[in-house]
Each structure stands twice: as C-alpha cells, then as structure tokens.
Amino acid sequence: MATLTDAQRLDWLQLIRSDNVGPRTFGWLLRQYGDARSAIEALPELSRRGGASRAIRIYPRADAEREMAAARKLGVQFIGIREGAYPQRLAEIDDAPPLLAVRGNLAALTRPMIAMVGSRNASAAGLKFAERLARELAEAGFVVASGLARGIDAIAHRASLATGTVAVLAGGHDHIYPEQHIDLLEAILPEGAAISEMPFGWEPRAQDFPRRNRLISGLSLGVVIVEAARRSGSLITARLALEQGREVFAVPGSPIDPRAEGTNGLLKQGATLVTEAADVLAVLEPILGRGTIISAREPDGEPPAPFEPDDRARAQILALLGPTPVTLDDLVRLSTLSPAIVRTVILELELAGRIERHGGGLFLLA
Amino acid sequence: MATLTDAQRLDWLQLIRSDNVGPRTFGWLLRQYGDARSAIEALPELSRRGGASRAIRIYPRADAEREMAAARKLGVQFIGIREGAYPQRLAEIDDAPPLLAVRGNLAALTRPMIAMVGSRNASAAGLKFAERLARELAEAGFVVASGLARGIDAIAHRASLATGTVAVLAGGHDHIYPEQHIDLLEAILPEGAAISEMPFGWEPRAQDFPRRNRLISGLSLGVVIVEAARRSGSLITARLALEQGREVFAVPGSPIDPRAEGTNGLLKQGATLVTEAADVLAVLEPILGRGTIISAREPDGEPPAPFEPDDRARAQILALLGPTPVTLDDLVRLSTLSPAIVRTVILELELAGRIERHGGGLFLLA
C-alpha cells in the first residue's frame, strides 16, 4: 500500500476527471506510464493518434486544486485505490474508482460491509423487516451500505447509524439526493461515511444511479434486496453484484404484491432467501474468514515501455471493431498483433472518443 | 389390472377394517396368503403366535355388508388398489389404502393431479393467489387435490370445480368436515370426487388429518403450499410429499407475516418457488411424460408358501426390538434369520398389537 503525496493526488484527480478517462482507462494509463503525471502528458498524443476530431480536454490543474479545496472545506478526503484507507473489496472490482471522495469516519470503510437496497415506495412490512435486518446485521459487526434513497435505503441507514453505515452518492458531495435526506446524511457521518466518485458540483442524473449502484455492491460482501419491482434499480444492483462475484440475497414477498416481483424473481434465479439475519450471516461468515483476493489494480510486473503502434496496426484494429462488442482477446486473436499493441491502439481510440468500453472488457465503435 | 368380484371386495373391506391391519400389513398378508379371504382366516393363528393377550377382532362380515350398502346408498364405490380406476400415483406409495371409498366422478381420479394446501386463516392475498393458481393449473389440465378445509383448501377446490377437483376426507363420507363445506363437496362431485379410506360413520379426530394428508400428496405429482405457519398441517403434507418422492412447491411471503413462515422455510429447504402457474408446470410437465413407476403393491413373484417360524426365531426378533425403531433389514442382519422368517414374525407381532410400524419401514415395541 502506497500513500499519495498531495501533488500525486492532484495528478490523479486531474487524470480521472479528464475527457474519455474512466476507471479502467485510468488503470491502463497508470500501468503504461507508471504515474498519473506522465499519463496526463501522454494524453494529447495518444488521443491524436487515435484519430480524435479535436484536442482532448484535460482537467485543468486549477480546477483540480479548486475541487480539492472545496472538498477539504466540507471535510471530504480523496482516497486513492492503492492507499490503505481505500475499501478493500471495492478495490477488487474491474472498474473501481481510482479516487474516492469520502466524508465522515474513514474507519467505517475498512470494516466488512453488507449492502441493503430496495423500493423507494416500500410497504410497511418491507420497511419493518428492513429495519430489523439492518439492526441485526449491524449488531453482528457489519457496516450497512446503501444509496440514501427513500424507503428501504433510508431505513437501512437509520437502523445502523450507531454502528456505522455507508451512503454511496450518485452526485457530488455538495449535491445530496434526495434533499430531504441531508439530515440523515449528517447523522450517518459520525460513525459512518458518505462516498462518491463524482466531481464536486455534480448534480446526479438518471444514468448516474446505475453507475453508482456498482459501488454499493462493490463495497460489500453481499447485497440484500428487500423489496423490488420488476426492472427496478435494485435489480441492477443485484446484477452488478453477481458480475462482481458478490453474494445476492433476496427477501420473499407475496406473488400478488408488485413490490415483491423483483425479489421473488431473484430467488427463482438462485439468490439466497432471507427471512432473518442468520440467513445472511450463514453465507457471509465463511467468506469473511477467507479475506479478499489480490486487487486487480496492482500492476502485474514492471510497467511496459510506452511505444507507438504503426498505422497498419491501427487500421487493422479499427477494421475489426464495429457496432457489435468484441473483447480484447478477440482483437488480439483476429489481428495476430501482440496484446501490448492492441491495448495501446484501444487506449488511443478510447481517449479519442471513438470507441466505447462496456462491462466485461467489451469494446465497440462509438 | 384385476377387477375385484363383489365377494372379494367384501373380503378386502373385512380385512382392512380388522384390528391391527393397516395398509402395509394388508399388502404383506395379501402377498403371503394370495387373497384376502385366506388372510382373514390366518389372522387368529398369526396373532396368537405373535403373543396377543386376547383374540384379534376381525371385522364381521355383516358389518362389511352394512358398510358396503350404506356406501352404495350415498353413491360411494370402493376401489381396490389393483383395479384400473384406482389413482395410479397413489398406488405407488408405501402405505396406499388397499380400498378407497370414492364418491363422484371416477374419471377425475385417472387424470394428473396437483395438490394445493395452506392455512385455514389465510390472508386476502393468499386466497387471491390460490384462486388464480388453482384456476390456471386446472386450465392446464390438472385436477386439483386438497383437503376441503377452510381457507386455501376451499378456494383451491372452488376455483377448479368446472374442470374437476378431488377432496380427500379425514373421516367417513357421511362425516364431512367442516360441516359448512357440505355444499362445496356437493358442487365438487359432478366433475370431481371425494375420497376417503376411513370407515363409514367415522368422525375425524385430530390425528386423522395428518394421516389423511399423505393421500393428498400421494395422489399428486406435487404439492403447492400457499400459506403455512410454522408447525402447521400443510408442512406435514410437504414432508410426506418429500418422503413419497413428490415435488414440493411453496409460495413466498413477507418474513413478517407468520402465515409465510412455513412456506419461506420450505423454500430455504429447497422447495420450488411459485409465483405463477408456469413455475409449477415447468417442473411437472417433464415428469408427466415419464409415466409412473411400477406399483410397489404388485407381488414380486409367486406368493411364498405360508410357514411357521419356530419359537427361537420369535424370541430372537423380540429381543432385538425395543423402544428405538429398527428396520426390517436391521432385524435380518442382526438375527441372521431369513427375510421371509423375519417378515412373518413381524407380521405376527403386528397383528398381536405388540409392535408399531412407523413410516420408512421402521418397527418398535408398542
């Protein structure tokens, strides 16, 4: 575990806030260039080689300094993925945020977490059950992670205030959603924490919530879905949890209650049925003992020397890309180019905004 | 498939109504003596050899004739286990009634059945769901079997009246329980049927309901438990269904509803979760295609010649029996006697009322 200097932290913030740089691209750049400063310096050339129609926008140093200052004023700290305070399980996921803006009690982030999510318009029974379950899981030593939404999220946070609960925000720390839960958030901070990967000043849009949900599941050993209608955000969290190798728990409900359609569906797909905390603990306690896997973020050796693919390689990769997602492995196999060259071409195209990266390492033309 | 003559039917009725003769003992006697008349004639000697304190009571011929006449008057027929009209799946179970008293439309008994049972004090949601499910399963070609109780049972019958539903009684056909459901029973008879293994005039006692429940599950390919509290009769039906190799389905409910404790518990134990008829059909339709296994009732060869074990064998078996149940295999192994001798000693002791037979072929001293 390294500790970032203030200057490095600013570099990281600048890099992750720059155009076309997501968490995975950040990781690639860091591996390729060794540090964020060198990566930032390489961005214009990489993007140009990728065929960008206009110069890539690098987050200005001054803006990064301003964001850092505003954060500090609100008591928010930025934690880098290689630092000790970064939540261990979250660091394992494929698209973990390189920098996490954290407000509150950092100690909460190092304890084992369980996510609890569910309907905003939950039933009285659902709320009562969620409250009991959150309290019992908190008493069993878990930090409860959730999304600060109305309904199940809010009651799960409230029931675990005393022992520590983590709210994951879809916007910046200065844009709490929903506004009515600003008081709840303040009550969370003494023992727990609020975290966000979004910039200060960011007002959450609809598409930011599913993106945020991957952090709720990623932080946790497992996710309990208390009530969920069909096609609800909670089901997105359940799917992300499965993709991340997290346990999925669901609370059963009457088949004629639409708020149970999602959870009953999860149970049919093999989620663990939960009627009491013991059902969750029975699954999680053995996992707790096992510790985490090695973080996928750690470089797997010395950073390779940066090099420039030739135009033939670029043309070959571009020809192989299309509207149907393909994997990096496919591209290597079909082009017969070396993985290092294909990775670099992909990086260039991504920074140029010409390809999109999907979950599971899939790429397609933007 | 044989058809019983009127005289044989009377013999069967006499034998099954005699003291210490249950369905399994009936089967043993029939295999040993070839027909019910010979078995009846052997009863006094067998029971005496088993050490009965007083002469075994054989159901008088006149009583059997009276019961048969009373049954006929109410439109009840007795169907023997080897006859074509006997429900095929029921014939497979270990303790299938040798004679089934049936009222109504015999054709309903030869169609595939699904049992639906649940709480007497069901919730509105439970009743609504049970009604919908029964109607859909009936439309899919299944006869719905249940126990004529208040709540889930009654609504399952009502929803499937038009296509045929089977009520299994815990008492005689002239003692319908609960009395309020006499009208429901009458409505069942045109397309469906009521069945009982109990004598005419038998008023159902508490212990007759669990015994009856094995017939509900035994008739059916599977059992759907709609709502069930902990330690309820519906859970007994579920356990019996498992023992009989039947599918168990359970309808989920809120963890804070005590009427869902039993069904949620079944789901944790591996029952199939049901929120719509398709969940049941997906499991049962492949089984339907497979047909039934060979009836365990069929003799596995020529009936062995009756013979008399010696006193040493009897003493040996008695010494091995105690308050802890043992299997026939244990007794054969530990005594080193032949299975035929052990079976005969057991039969004698059973007819003498000195041992009890439990499910799973277990015996213990009475």
Image (cartoon, coloured by chain):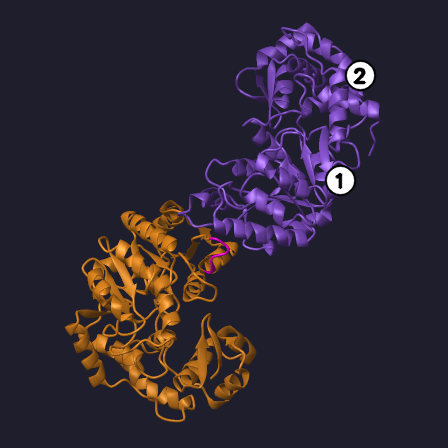
Chain colours: A orange, B purple
Task: Tell me if A83 is positioned left or right of A304 in this view.
Answer: left
B22 or A292: which is nearer to us?
Answer: B22
Residue sitting at x 45%, y 80%: A356
Q: Is residue B61 above or below residue A101?
A: above
Packing grade of label 1 (10 A; few <14, some 14-19, many >=20) is many
Q: Amino acid at mark 1?
A: Leu
Q: Nearer the viewer, mark 1 or mark 2?
A: 1
User: Which is nearer the eye, A317 or A237?
Assistant: A237
**Quick check: can you spot residue B73?**
yes
Residue occupied by mark 2? B38
Quadrant (top left, top right, bottom left, bottom right) of the N terminus of chain A: bottom left
Disc on res. B106:
1
Identify which amino acid the numbered label 2 is placed on: Ser
Q: CA distance from mark 1 to mark 2?
A: 30 Å
Q: Whole-percent x and y of residue B227?
A: 50, 45
The part of the chain drawn in magenta is A254-258
